[in-house]
Image (cartoon, coloured by chain):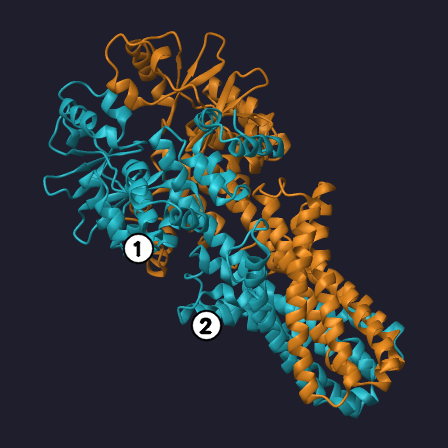
Chain colours: A cyan, B orange
C-alpha cells in the first residue's frame, strides 16, 4: 500500500532525530519510498533533513530523493552539502537527466567542482552534454539512458545487446532500433523480441512508425505531443536524425502540470510558484506585485471618475452601479481571455481564422450582453425612479460586455504574437483595464442620456 | 515524424469525400494515426466523418479513433452508427476500459443491444464488470488487460504464460505476480525475466513492494498517487486484495488535465467544459450562468449603495474610489482562494492546522493591506483636498484586503468540508461577495470618518 504522512509519524521521527538514534532513523529511511522522504522535507528544518538523508543507505534511493525534491528545496539542501557527497552519494547514482537538473541548480562556480568529483566518467560526460540544452526544450528534458539495437541484428544478437545495456536503464519502455550511423529507424517491443522465432532479423519485425522530436522542440509542445499520442517515452534526435536520448512520461507530466499551474496562478494574480505551505514572506512576494498593478490601475480609474465629478454630484444614483459595471466588464473579459489562453496552450487555436474567432466572440458577447442588459433594465424599470438611469445603466452594461469580451479575445492573441505569455491577459491586468474602459463607457453614456432623456 | 493538421490538407480531404473517391480516402486513412483522425473530427460534419471512419480498414485503428474522440463528439458519432457496426467494428477491438467508456456513452436502452452483438464473450463480460464501477473511481478507469504470472512458477513457466496472454495486451508495463487465489503479490519486469538464470523461481526475484489502489478510490487521488510515485501503471485490487485490473498513465494524465481545466474554468467563470472551437450556443450556455450570478450579486451591491445615497450626494468624491475598493477586495480574495483550492486539489493541505493557515493568511493580508493602503494614502495626501477622504479610502482598503483574504481562505475550506467543489470559491461568487462586503465596509468607514474628521 502507499504511505501517508501524519502528524504522529512526524512527531515521532523528530524525536528520534533529536535523540540522534542513528539506527532507528536509518531503519525508517530504509522502509520509506523516495517520493515520501522528499515529501516530508517541507516539514523538517535543514539540519533534520540533512541528518536523515545522509542515513539513507540505498544510494539509488538517496539519488531518487534528491531528484524528487522541488527546485527551491533542492537548492537549499545542496547548499548544505559538500561537493564530494553530492557527487558520490547522489549524482553517481542518478539518471542523467535528473543529474543534469541537479548540477544546473548549483551556482556556476560549484558546477565544475562537483562534475570533476563524479567517478563515472561516462555519467559526467552525459551530464555535460545535457547541460548544453535549454531546460525548456526536448534536449533539456531528455535522459541518455536508452536501450538500442542495430537494425541488422537478429533477435538473439539483439537480446544479448539488451542484456549488456540493461543495467543502466530503470524502465525500458521501448527498445530503439538504429542503423550503423546511430540514426533512429524505429522501435521494437521486448514482447516482440521474446515471441519472435530464432534467427528472425530485427529489420523484418521492427515498427518503423515512430514519433520522435528534435532536441530544440519546446517542452510544452513535446508534452502536448506525448499527451495526444499517449506515449510513455519519446525519442529525441539531432538535426540529421541521430538518436540522442529519450524523454519519459513522468517528466512530461511535470511539464503539463507546471504549465497548468502557471496559467492558474496567472489568473489568480499570483506571480510566483507558491503553495499554501510556503512562508509568509514568499507568499507576500508572490501576491503583492499584482495587487500593486491593480492598485495603480484603479487609481487611474479614480482619476477618470474625478473627471465626472459634477455629473456624479448631480446624479448620485449613477454611483450605485459603478461596481456593477466594473465587475461585469471584468467577468466577461476574463471569460473570453481564458478560453483563448487555453486554446493557445493546447495548440488547437491555430486552424480557426482570427476573423472567425472574432465573429463568434461578438455573437456570444451579443447574447450575453442583451440578456444581462434586459434583466437589469427590467429591475431598474420597476425599482428605480429615473428612466434616464434605467436606460444608461442597461446601455452601458451591454456596451461594456461587448467591449470587454472583444478586448479579452484580442489581448491574449496579441501577446501571443509578440511572444509574451498570453496568460498574463487573464490576470488583474485585463480586469483592471476593463474596469477603466468600463467606467469611461458608463459615464460617457450617462452624460449623453441624462442630457437628452 | 508527427502529423500537423493544415487547412490545405483538410480542403483536399473534403474534396475527396465529396467526390466519393473511396480508394483515395481509404489510403489517407491508412496513413494517418488514430489520434490525428480523431483530432480532425471537429472540422468535419457528421456525414463526412462517418464516411471516412467506415473506410478505416485496420480495425484496431478504427477502435482507437473512437476511443480518442472526446465525449461529446463520440456521443454524436455513435448516434449515427447502427448497433452491429459499433459492436463488430469498434468494441470488439478496443481495450476493455475504452470499450466500457463507449458503452457508457450510449443511451440506456442501446447499451444492452450493443453488448449482445459483441462476438467476443470475454470482452462483453469484462465490459459488464467494468460498467458496475463509478466512472470517477479507480474501478471506472481500469482496464482488464493485464499480464499475470503465478508466484510459484519458475522463469520458463512464467515466460510461456506471458506468451499466452500477450495477444490481448498492447503495452506490458508490468507483469503482475499473483498467488493461487489471484491475490496481488507484486510485480516482475520483463527485463528481469529475460536476464534470470534458467529454473529461477519467480518468488525469489519478484518485487514485493508494489503500490496498488482499491477499486473505489477516487480518480483524482489515484492520479495524485501515480504522479507522486511516477507510475506508468497502477494495479487495482478488490477488498480482499485480488487483482482486478490496471490503470495506465494515459488515463491518469487525462484525469489530471480534466481536473486542472475544471479548476481553471471555474476561476474564469465558465460553467461547462468548452473550447474556443465550440459553437456560439454552447459557449453562451457555459458563460451566461456565472455572468447572471455576478449580475444578481452586483444588483444587491447597488441596492446597498443606494442606502448610502445621502452620503454619496454630500461627498461625491467617495464614488471615485468605489471601483478601486471593489476590485482590490476581489483580487485579494481570489488570490487566497486559489492557493487553498490548489492545496486541496493536490492533497497537501491536510497536515497544516486550520489555525496555522489562518495566522499565515492574516500575516500576508496584513502586509499586503498595509503596503497598498500606504501607497493610496500617499497618493491622496498629495492629490486630494479632503483629509477625511484620504483616511477613509486607505482605512477601507486595508480592511477590505484583510476581510477578503480571510473570506477567500475560509470559503473554499468550508465548501470542502461540505463536500462541495471548493473551486467554486475562485469564481465570480467570491469576487461578487467581496464586492458587496467591501462596499459596506467602505461606506460605513466613510460615514464615521466624515463625521469626525
Q: Assess disc 2: are there few (<14), some (14-19) or many (≥20) residues with their C-alpha within 10 Å of its C-alpha.
A: few
Residue B377 versus residue B407: which sits nearer the camera? B377
How many marks the image carries: the answer is 2
Residue A168 versus residue B434: which sits nearer the camera? A168
- Can see residue A131? yes
Point out which mark residue B1 bears: none
B358 relative position to A123: left or right: right
- Residue shown at the point (28%, 52%) measured from the top left: A111
Residue A214 % position (x, y)? 26, 52
- Residue shown at the point (46%, 21%) measured from the top left: B119
N-terminal label among 2 and 1? 1
Residue A207 % position (x, y)? 24, 35
Q: Assess disc 1: are there few (<14), some (14-19) or many (≥20) residues with their C-alpha within 10 Å of its C-alpha.
A: some
Q: Which residue is mark 1?
A: A217
Q: Quadrant of the C terminus of chain B?
A: bottom right
Q: Which residue is mark 2?
A: A414
Q: Spatial distance from mark 2 to mark 1, Cα to Cα? A: 23 Å
Amino acid at each position: 500500500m502507499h504511505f501517508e504522512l501524519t502528524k504522529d509519524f512526524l512527531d515521532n521521527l523528530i524525536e528520534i532525530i533529536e535523540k540522534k538514534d542513528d539506527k532507528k532513523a536509518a531503519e525508517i529511511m530504509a522502509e520509506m519510498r523516495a517520493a515520501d522522504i522528499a515529501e516530508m522535507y517541507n516539514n523538517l528544518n535543514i539540519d533534520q533533513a540533512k541528518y536523515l538523508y545522509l542515513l539513507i543507505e540505498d544510494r539509488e534511493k538517496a539519488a531518487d530523493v534528491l531528484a524528487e525534491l522541488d527546485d527551491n528545496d533542492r537548492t537549499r539542501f545542496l547548499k548544505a552539502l559538500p561537493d564530494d557527497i553530492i557527487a558520490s552519494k547522489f549524482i553517481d547514482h542518478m539518471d542523467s537527466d535528473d543529474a543534469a537538473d541537479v548540477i544546473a541548480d548549483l551556482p556556476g562556480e560549484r558546477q565544475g567542482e562537483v562534475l570533476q568529483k563524479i567517478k563515472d566518467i561516462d555519467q559526467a560526460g552525459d551530464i555535460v552534454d545535457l547541460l548544453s540544452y535549454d531546460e525548456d526544450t526536448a534536449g533539456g528534458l531528455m535522459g541518455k539512458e536508452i536501450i538500442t539495437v542495430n537494425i541488422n541484428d537478429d533477435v538473439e544478437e539483439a537480446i544479448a545487446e539488451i542484456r549488456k545495456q540493461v543495467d543502466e536503464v530503470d524502465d525500458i519502455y521501448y527498445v530503439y532500433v538504429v542503423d550503423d550511423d546511430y540514426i533512429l529507424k524505429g522501435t521494437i517491443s521486448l514482447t516482440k523480441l521474446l515471441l519472435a522465432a530464432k534467427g528472425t532479423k530485427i529489420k523484418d519485425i521492427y515498427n518503423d512508425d515512430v514519433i520522435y522530436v528534435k532536441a530544440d522542440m519546446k517542452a510544452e509542445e513535446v508534452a502536448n505531443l506525448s499527451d495526444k499520442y499517449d506515449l510513455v517515452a519519446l525519442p529525441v534526435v539531432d538535426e540529421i536524425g541521430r538518436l540522442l536520448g529519450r524523454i519519459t512520461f513522468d517528466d512530461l507530466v511535470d511539464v503539463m502540470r507546471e504549465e497548468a499551474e502557471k496559467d492558474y496562478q496567472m489568473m489568480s494574480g499570483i506571480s510566483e510558484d507558491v503553495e499554501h505551505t510556503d512562508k509568509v514572506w514568499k507568499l507576500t512576494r508572490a501576491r503583492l506585485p499584482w495587487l500593486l498593478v491593480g492598485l495603480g490601475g484603479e487609481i487611474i480609474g479614480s482619476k477618470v471618475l474625478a473627471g465626472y465629478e459634477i455629473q456624479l454630484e448631480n446624479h448620485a444614483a449613477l454611483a450605485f452601479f459603478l461596481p456593477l459595471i466594473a465587475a461585469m466588464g471584468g467577468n466577461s473579459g476574463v471569460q473570453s481571455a481564458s478560453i483563448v489562453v487555453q486554446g493557445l496552450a493546447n495548440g488547437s487555436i491555430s486552424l480557426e481564422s482570427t476573423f472567425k474567432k472574432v465573429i463568434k466572440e461578438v455573437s456570444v458577447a451579443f447574447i450575453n450582453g442583451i440578456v444581462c442588459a434586459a434583466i437589469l433594465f427590467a429591475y431598474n424599470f420597476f425599482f428605480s425612479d429615473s428612466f434616464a438611469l434605467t436606460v444608461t445603466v442597461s446601455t452601458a452594461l451591454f456596451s461594456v460586455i461587448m467591449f470587454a469580451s472583444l478586448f479579452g479575445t484580442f489581448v491574449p492573441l496579441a501577446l501571443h504574437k509578440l511572444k509574451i505569455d498570453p496568460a498574463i491577459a487573464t490576470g488583474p491586468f485585463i480586469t483592471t483595464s476593463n474596469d477603466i474602459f468600463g467606467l469611461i463607457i458608463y459615464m460617457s453614456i450617462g452624460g449623453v442620456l441624462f442630457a437628452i432623456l
